[in-house]
Image (cartoon, helix red, strand yellow):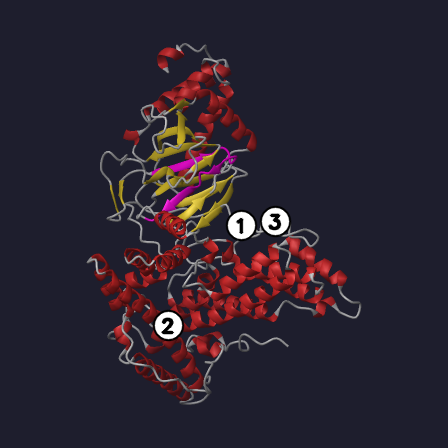
Amino acid sequence: MRERIWAPPPPPLLLLLLLPLPLWGGPPDSGRGRGELEPERGPLQPFDLLYASGVAAYYSGDYEQAVRDLEAALSSHRRLREIRTRCTRHCAARRPLAPPGTGPGAELPFFRALLERARCYRSCETQRLGGPASRHRVSEDVRSDFQRRVPYNYLQRAYIKLNQLDKAMEAAHTFFMANPEHMEMQQNIENYRMMAGVEAFQMTDREAKAHLESYSAAVKHYEADDFEVAIKYFEQALREYFNEDAECRTLCEGPQRFEEYEYLGYKAGLYEAIADHYMQVLVCQHECVRELATRPGRLSPIENFLPLHYDYLQFAYYRVGEYVKALECAKAYLLFHPDDEDVLDNVDYYESLLDDDLDPESIEAREDSAMFVKRHKLESELIKSAAEGLGFSYTEPNYWIRYGGRQDENRVPSGVNVEGAEVHGLSMGKKSSPKIERDLREGGPLLYENITFVYNSEQLNGTQRVLLDNVLSEEQCRELHSVASGIMLVGDGYRGKTSPHTPNEKFEGATVLKALKFGYEGRVPLKSARLFYDISEKARKIVESYFMLNSTLYFSYTHMVCRTALSGQQDRRNDLSHPIHADNCLLDPEANECWKEPPAYTFRDYSALLYMNDDFEGGEFIFTEMDAKTVTASIKPKCGRMISFSSGGENPHGVKAVTRGQRCAVALWFTLDPLYRELERIQADEVIAILDQEQQGNHELNINPKDEL
């Protein structure tokens, strides 16, 4: 029989509003007898003070002191988490809570137990910390820095100053694992590896989560068809996941931010205060699944950690002939994705392989997954219900949305691959974006059939962002690409500079008016030139509708652009195809500001990029934080894909190096101010109007295109 991960179903919802989550069950404190904790050695130094001291020492050039303080800060931070976790479990075991009874005063034993548990925790924490817990309260900025592993960035620089290359590499790698798109650190690691002759797999991530390490090992064995060993690691990863889930939930029981009520005077009663605090704890615990299932710094196929586990396991167990376990895992996966046709077919197939004396209906989804999903759904219902009753706002994320983790033929007879998602978001450590001086809305209709919504602002980890597919058909992409070769000029739009952004690529461009001119002169098909005009208008209407703008959106500039990798210049590239910038302000990464002043195009309000092809290497579109280094989302271009976003400092962006082939797109900038309408677009509108009249046979075309265009 399997070990139960959680306790039986929780008490009624009303009671849950009054009970801390230890009542929901969880592993008891291990290693010593019930209620016993080993003594602590000396008072724990606050990690924020050690961190500040280390940073100050670094900037003063005292690198030895910087290393001592920063390492001590990291150690203190880890120890603080351990103490809080152990004290919570210790006091939950020693001071169990009983549901209130009935009759006069029946609730008093419950509140007495609650107060005893609070006193136990306060006493335990004070004793273990060697002083009041208030010394260890830190600012949100410090909390964010440790979540993003910023201390390791300082450490790698300090260690290299001290000529301790091994430790510098270790610190750099640890930081990079949480910030995988940090380009400067990526280059540092490459330099360190060249200096030391060390391969990537030899580096150590000092903050690695055990369950993700086991998961990665399992996937490697799985892909090597070593299914028995893969099963061992997958099962280990699940056990480690549920242990870390319990720890995450425990840490949520600390102080919460009270935003809805003011606990002075008579503005909130006892039950109202308890309920509000409990709901904040519950939301924190409910979202542990996101923290544990995502690698630090990236939103990846790991986002589907639990369902993806069972998806792998069902096939691995099938390959080793354990059909009952394969069926249990397949049914476990369906708890997360009940409409997955491939796995539904697998279930039928596994049932056909069972011994005749086994009833397929008696084999249910694995208990660990069933209990997890049951609790997760109950939490969702409770939070939604409380949100209505208590008046706070909460939007339930889709935790099991598929970001591209398993886009394979995962029917039973087929092999299984793991492909990287085309779009990766980075959710950790995101700084607040500048305020936009207008109402921020999105989610309006897409207006056209066949357009596929992919991600919104939240899923792209930003403000005023949307990703759409199928804005163009394959045929339209081919036609536009063909037109591009006939109308583009090298350096168009950049004063004829062949490589305005990087010497490693050739840049070519063309405007809508130029395309129409070439079409009218017969140098390219007029129908194809007209397509360039039409699809840009289509994009404008989509952006205006999706972002629910109250006024007309005008073209500011329309440009078809192609970037071509130059042969012989792609080795060891560490530059970008287009450096990080914002479209309507001057980005200042050092100050984390974006100055809305000339020569920036301050009148631009929205931007869009409509991609025409994907037969090239590199060239991903990236959003970054205002530091111009830390990527928050990365988009792989393909035919018909469109990314659109507001043009200000809230959306710094750039293009990764195109290392092979040619990348083509239609770049569009829009303004809400009619004074800054694109002049060439107005002329193009007039040409189109005349062409339409000519086509209708109303009158003859009476302009000389060479003069007018």
> Which quadrant would residue 655 be assigned to in this image?
top left
The three-letter amino acid code for the residue at tag 3 is: Asp
The secondary element bearing badge 3 is classed as loop
Residue 675 in which image quadrant: top left
Residue 446 at what x, y percent from top left? 47, 40
Residues shaded magenta: 606-625
Question: In the visual, does 351 lie left or right of 459?
Answer: right
Point 47% across, 81% down: residue: 30
Residue 607 is inside the magenta segment: yes
Using the image as rendered, state which of residue 140 and residue 530 is in the foreground.
Answer: 140
Few, some or many residues within 10 Å of mark 2 (<14, 14–19, 20+): some
Marks 1 and 3 close (CB-CB < 8 Å): no
Left or right of residue 223: residue 685: left
Q: What residue did someone put label 1 on?
A: 404
For the image, the number of numbered tags is: 3
The span from disc 1 to disc 3 (Cα, nearest Å) is 10 Å
Quarter containing the N terminus: bottom right
Query: 17 or 457, which is in the foreground?
Result: 457
Find out whether residue 284 is within the magenta segment. no
Say which mark, if any, is on residue 81. 2
Residue of label 3: 408
The majority secondary structure of the magenta stretch comes to strand
Q: Position of residue 339 (x, y in %)?
A: 62, 55
